[in-house]
Each structure stands twice: as C-alpha cells, then as structure tokens.
Amino acid sequence: MANGYAGKILSINLTKKTITTLDTEKYKEYAGGIGIASAIFWDLAVAPGDWDLKDAYDPRNVISLMSGPLAGTGIPGAGRTSISAVSPETFPIHQFARTSMGGRFATMLKQAGWDGVVVQGKSERPVWINIINDKVTIEDARSLWGLNTYETQSEITSMVAGRTRFGDEWHQIDEEYTTARPQIVCIGPIGETRAKIAALIHGSGVSARLGGFGGVFGAKNLKAISVIGTGGVKVSDPKGVVDTRLWHFTAFPKPLHNDPGNASCMPCLRCDRRRNSYHGGETMCVDQHWFNGHGDAMEDRAAEMLMKYGLSGWGGHFEGMKMFVADVPGAPEFFKGKVPVEPGMGWYLKYLYDQGILGSGRKIDSYPLHMDQYDTLSFREAFLDCIARRIGIGDALAEGLLEAAEKWGRLEEDLNNGALRLPAWGAVYHWTLPGVEWSYNYLLGTGDPAWHGFFALGKNMGGGPGALGEPAGTYSIERLLEIMSAKTIPFTGDPMMFNYAWKGEDAKKTGIYSEHKAKQVAWTRHYASFWNESMSFCEMLLPVFINVDRPDNWGPSPDVELRYYQAVTGNKIPFEETMAIGKRLWTLERAIRVMGGRDRENEKFAPFMYKPGASAMNFQGGVPVYENGKWSWQDNLDMYLDDTGVELFKTRYYKLEGWDERNGWPTRKTLEGMGLKHVADDMAAKGKLGT
C-alpha cells in the first residue's frame, strides 16, 4: 500500500497476549486517524454486544493511537496522533471520546510501517509495547512501574537504542541504521493509579491531556508504547507536495516562531514546544502556565513536575493564563475579577478554602495539602503526589473533580453557581462563551473540542488560529463575512452562520439558536472530523480563512488542505466530498456514543451556563452580531444561554445531521445513505436506532 498509508495496523490483546495485524485497506474508506479508530472500535468493542460501553476501565475497552495518511510525508502540521477510547474523564457516564497530541510518535509509527496501534484487554502485570519496524513484542514493565515519565522514556531508550545523542550518533536497528531515538508514549505515577485526569505523555513535554487516557493505560497495566522505524512513506505526487509547501509559504506568509527545539512536532511551522533537550525547557499552553500563569521562572519547574507525574494540565488546572470572568450583573459575588477563564481542580480547591469549607480540620479535610501554601511550588508537588499515591484528599481527586464534589455534597450547588465551571461532560471551561459554537461542540461531543478554527471571526484575530498573539486584523466585518461565506463549503452564501445575536427573537431566527448556527456547528464538526482528526492537521495551523498580510485578506483554507491531500493520496475528490466524509465519520462517532447511553435528555449544559456570568472573555475583540438590519462587532461578555433556545437549536441541529429529532439518534436512512448499514443493524438490535 502507498499514497500515504503504511498498509497495516497493529492490534494487541493484552489479556490473550496476542499480536496481530489489521489490513488498512479494509478501513481506508474511513480516511485515517479518528475515522479508522472509530470503525475499529465499532468492530471490536460495539458489534460483539457483550458490554454497555460505560466503564472505561473494562478490559474490553479499545484504545487506539492512530496516524493519518499525511503523517511522515513532510506535510506541515499533519503529524499528530489521534487517540480514542471510552473515556474515564466524562461525567456523569463514561463515553467514547477522542483527543490528539503532537510530537513525533505518528511520524515514527509510519516509518516503522504502521498506520496505528490498537490495544484491548488487560495484562496480569505491568508491560510495555516495543515496536521496532515489523518486530513487535510485549515486554515486562515491572522495573518501570513507579517511574516518572522522563525516567520511563530514558530507560526504554537505553534498552532500545542505547545511550545515543539525539541526531548526532548512528545506531543499528535490525539491518538498518538511524540517528533517531524511539518515540514513546507513556504514563507516570498518576496514570498508574488509574486517575481520571491522567494524561499520556510523549517526549519532553507533549501530552494528550484530554480524556483521561493515562488512566486507561493504567487500568490495562500498560506503562508505555515505544516505536522506532527506519522506513519511509510513499506519496502519490512528491513534486506536488513540495510545490504546495512553497505556494503555502510564499502566497500566504505569516509570522512564525523561529526558534524550534528538537522536540517540536514533526514537521512544525509554529514550533510551540520550543525545547532544546530531551528533558526540560518550555512546554505549551496550559501545561506551561499550570503554576500561576505569570510566565515566571517557576513555570518551567512546575510544568516539568506536571509532565513527570503525568497529570492532565486541563483537569488539574490552577490559574492558567490569568484571563478573568467579566463583572456581569447578577453573577455570583465571588466571580468579580477572581475567576480565571479555565478554572480546574486546583482553583476549585482554593475556592472551597476561601469559603471556609476546605482545609486542615475543616468540613473537607485537605490533608496532606497545606492550603496556606497554595501559591508555592511545593504545594503543586504535594498536589501531584497525593493524587499519585491516593492519600488523603488525593484519593477523591483521583476520581475526578465532579466525582469529588459529589462525594463532598457540593456538586449541585457549585454547578449552579459556577464555582464548578465545567460546562458539559466534566470538561474544564475553555473559551466556551461567547464563542457559542465551541459550547455546542462541548455538548455534542464529549467535552472540550479544542478547535480554534473560527478564531478568525474575532475583530482582532485576523490570521485565524495561527494568529494568536500576532497583530490585530485590518479587515472590515463585511469583508470577513464575504470571505467566510465563500469558504465554508458546502454551506456557502450564508453569512448568518456567523451571527452571534443571543437575545430575543433574533437569537432564534438568525442568531445562536437558529438553523444558520446549526450549519456553522455542523461545519466545524465535519471539517474537524476529516481534516484535523483523520488527516491529523494541527488545528492551531489549519484552517486559516483570513490573512491580513494580503491586500485581499484571502487565507489559504480550504485550498491548501485539499492540495496537500491530493498530492499525498492521489485522490482528486473535491473539498465538498471531504466534508461529506467528515459528516460520515462524525455520525459514526455519534452512533458509538448512542450505544453507550447518549440521548437528547442527557445532552444538557451545566446549570451555570443558563445564568449571568456564563461568558468568560472575548480577547478576539468582538464577534459579529446582526441586529436591527446591520452588522457590528460586539464583545457579548454578558451572554448566557436560554434553555428553550438550546432545545430549539438541538432540534434544528439533529434535523440537519439526519438524526432523530426526538432523541438525537442517527436514523437508518442516514446511516445506510453513508454506507453504514452494519451500524444501523447493530443499533436496531439494541433498540438504539433513530426513526
């Protein structure tokens, strides 16, 4: 097999100790990444029908680490790894979820001759998976159990490749030679204890921080997966790949970081993870700002602790990037300039302490945490350690923030008042309002979509997601809507898709509860499912619709994505067809979640989302709002949702997707029209098929 695919997928059953191969050709119609992973999950976990898909720690759970066909081909930003399984982090029920990570794992996997790794079952004792080209073994990990993620990777590297200097010394792998180290995904002590906010850690600071998949590794007694390969990836049109790269960079120039470290994603343009050594240096985003958001010298040390223990920087969030909830009339008093936009577990502990509820000898005993030391580095380490060892308050925290609040009798009150600022499915608030399409993506998926594709809609965000921290845009609102309406294929010609009117009848007719908004949300999910999660393009790189460096403000998307895809795969389909595939993949994910208990009734936001104070920030400088017959930029910082409006949106969205409007379940007509008759048959057998 060629044209971007390695041709085979590694399948390992830890219970049976079997190592087998799946033929990629069987799953090629599902594109790659999350698409192929979802199809395999259906075959291995759903179709047998012998469990309810509600326990992420069940040995029958299948976790996949998948590449896309563009990985390892030199396509910028397309080397991410898609990870999916039933997630322990989702609340109130475990559900099928996905996340992704950067780094070099997917590229190395392809160079070893594999499109992905699929793991099910549970080992009797700790193990790690060793992939060296075609040779795959399940190794004893008892000597690694208890080690942090840096120690684990160092030990595995010494076993696989010797004590090499990365990029400087040749070493032999089978009959070949390489200067590369193995690429390793592993868990730290927090994953070993099956904590629901355990991350998967890769390299010097890349983490799959959403989904709690470190806990899934821990439940399977799987410490790590290591891969090293000496092969390559064949593409359909090598010259087309090079020509498209040159066109991309010359026709659409934009500022980029110019100091990449050897731990940057491969290949990377933004170089977000600018590390210059295997250990240490700067991480990225929430992980780097985990300590206090000040960007001071303590941040690097705290981020290194986070990586070593293997905690999710989102789930265990403290103060983040110091962007605060607006002062909104009617919001709880403690919101007034005190709540960060992304408050997770650490901040919630501080809230309870300030309220006199949590602390030494209080109603909720904080042992072994000394809350008066909250602002210190030693407190952060004690926080990580107590979760890893499940001692004192750490045992409750390891079960997840909402589970802990429920145990303490705080869940209902603090979800209502917003102290537990988790909008849906237990995921930490992340730019969720007034960017309402982000909110809906939370609701319809399994939490934070982490998708920045429509940041171009902000007045000050002219370059799209790649423009974070760059100069403000210079385009008019009319030019923005003209460009966006032309580029959002197949829903072209509808500027009302980008209307953020949220009050009165305007909200229902043309605003955030309208058919227009349903189309915008559907576009994000179909694009993300194909391009970001199956082709594995970094969502901080693409899509980019607007480019302020060009007189016409025209950005490269969606042309550049399609040109890269066609050059690698040789598949000359139009962009509209890729979006149809994305819709198919999104519907397959929906079917999995329905089989696990998803329906309209439990697709609800947390209560605080329907009250003043729900919005957090609009650092984009305002979003487009159409009122009284004209467009304007508005910050919408007083936005909150209306329950009847959300229900109206759901009806309109379900109808657009071809799902049953009464329960949100895909119908037979929809599934069979997408070539998913076997999915419809399995759903019908369980009484889960929409009508």
Image (spheres, rainbow, N blue to C red):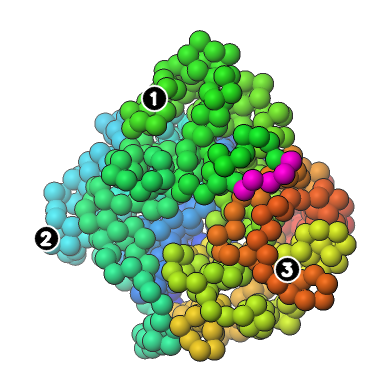
Q: Residue 609 colored magenta?
A: no
Query: Which residue is labeled 3 in the image?
Result: 625
Q: CA distance from mark 3 to mark 2?
A: 58 Å
Rendering coords of residue 541 (x, y %): 46, 69
Q: Quadrant of residue 186?
A: top left
Give the residue at x 35% y 31%.
376
In the image, the segment drawn in magenta is 326-330
Rendering coords of residue 474 (x, y %): 53, 79
> Are dots 2 and 1 in contact, CB under 8 Å?
no
Count neighbours of disc 1 (C-alpha within 10 A) and say few if under 14, some if 14 to 19, many if 20 or more.
Answer: few
Q: Is residue 517 left or right of residue 647?
A: left
- The amino acid pointed to by label 1 is Gln
Give the residue at x 67% y 21%.
409
Residue 537 lies, with reference to residue 561, above or below; the image says: above
Frontmost of labels 2 and 1 is 1
Q: Earlier in the sequence, mark 2 or mark 1?
A: 2
Front position in the image: 290 or 652: 290
Q: Secondary structure at mark 2?
A: loop
Is residue 177 something that shows in the picture? Answer: yes
- The amino acid pointed to by label 3 is Val
Q: Is residue 68 left or right of residue 651?
A: left
Q: Quadrant of residue 437?
A: bottom right
Give the residue at x 23% y 51%.
278
Image quadrant in which the C terminus is located? bottom right
Front position in the image: 532 or 683: 532
Q: CA distance from mark 1 to mark 3?
A: 45 Å
Q: Earlier in the sequence, mark 1 or mark 3?
A: 1
Frontmost of labels 3 and 2 is 3
